[in-house]
Image (cartoon, grey):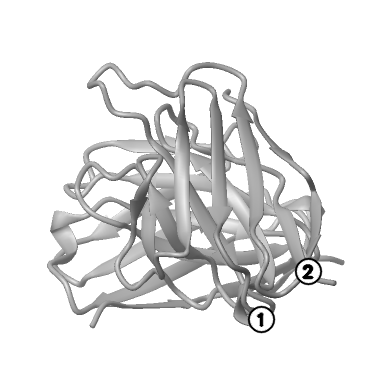
Amino acid sequence: DIVMTQTPLSSPVTLGQPASISCRSSQSLVHSDGNTYLSWLQQRPGQPPRLLIYKISNRFSGVPDRFSGSGAGTDFTLKISRVEAEDVGVYYCLQGTQFPYTFGQGTKLEIK
Amino acid sequence: EVQLLESGGGLVQPGGSLRLSCGASGFTFSDYAMAWVRQAPGKGLEWVAAISGSGGSTYYADSVKGRFTISRDNSENTLYLQMNSLRAEDTAAHYCARAASYGSGSYGYWGQGTLVTVSS
């Protein structure tokens, strides 16, 4: 199975400042069809997960443009350009290249 | 509007069985792969199982293989998870999720979850 490792596990940030979360996979996420199925999800307290980014850098419907994704191969990054109060929660990366799909451990975003 | 509504959770003894259901509406159900994802109390997300739109292909996490069965009834717009030989470590909120789009490799729509508690 592909292991997904996120860093940091906790990220205290100041409102209005940028934030960055990294995700590394134990093997390349490039699928035989040429796509890389790496996504990012947000889970606010008490809520189900919400898809933010899919296929590395595509924002899902309704996601603010302060969220962006980048990376290739085995190393990926989620960036929030200016953190807002509503961004508090846990962020997960998910690989959908190979079954079984696997999530990262999660990164808790907190406001300083 | 896409809606997913899970049901069937509850308290079950170790070794027991439970069947979860997920009713879907707002989209052509048979067009989309579906999945179950769970979250133990205070823990992270764990992908459990997935099924293709036709139901012809199924996939499982190693932790549930041989014990859980994912299925769907496209005529009833319903997804199922049959859980047998339940263990304490299966205690979790179980979410039903729909593929974001064909070929997205991720899940864009989620239910609110149903809690399964395995305890004597």
Residue B14 x %, y %: 78, 57
Residue at 62% x, 29% y is A24
The residue lying toward the viewer, choosing from A32 and A63, is A63
Tell me the number on the disc at residue A110.
2
Left or right of A29 in this view: B61 = right
Of all chains, the one bearing label 1 is A
- Say which label, 2 or 1, has the lower sequence index: 1
The CA distance from mark 2 to mark 1 is 9 Å
Q: Is residue A4 visible?
A: yes
The C terminus of chain A: image quadrant: bottom right
* Mark 1: secondary structure: helix
The residue lying toward the viewer, choosing from A72 and B40, is A72
Q: Are marks 2 and 1 on the same chain?
A: yes
Residue A43 x %, y %: 60, 67
The N terminus of chain A: image quadrant: top right
Image quadrant in which you'd find residue B43: bottom right
Q: Which residue is mark 1?
A: A85
Tell me the number on the disc at residue B79.
none
Residue at 56% x, 52% y is A79
Question: Within 10 Å of the Cα at label 1, are there few (<14), some (14-19), or many (20+) other Cα atoms?
Answer: few
The residue lying toward the viewer, choosing from A112 and B102, is A112
Residue A12 x %, y %: 82, 62
Q: Residue furthest front?
A: A17
Instruction: Count up the numbered dots.
Output: 2
Q: Amino acid at mark 1?
A: Ala
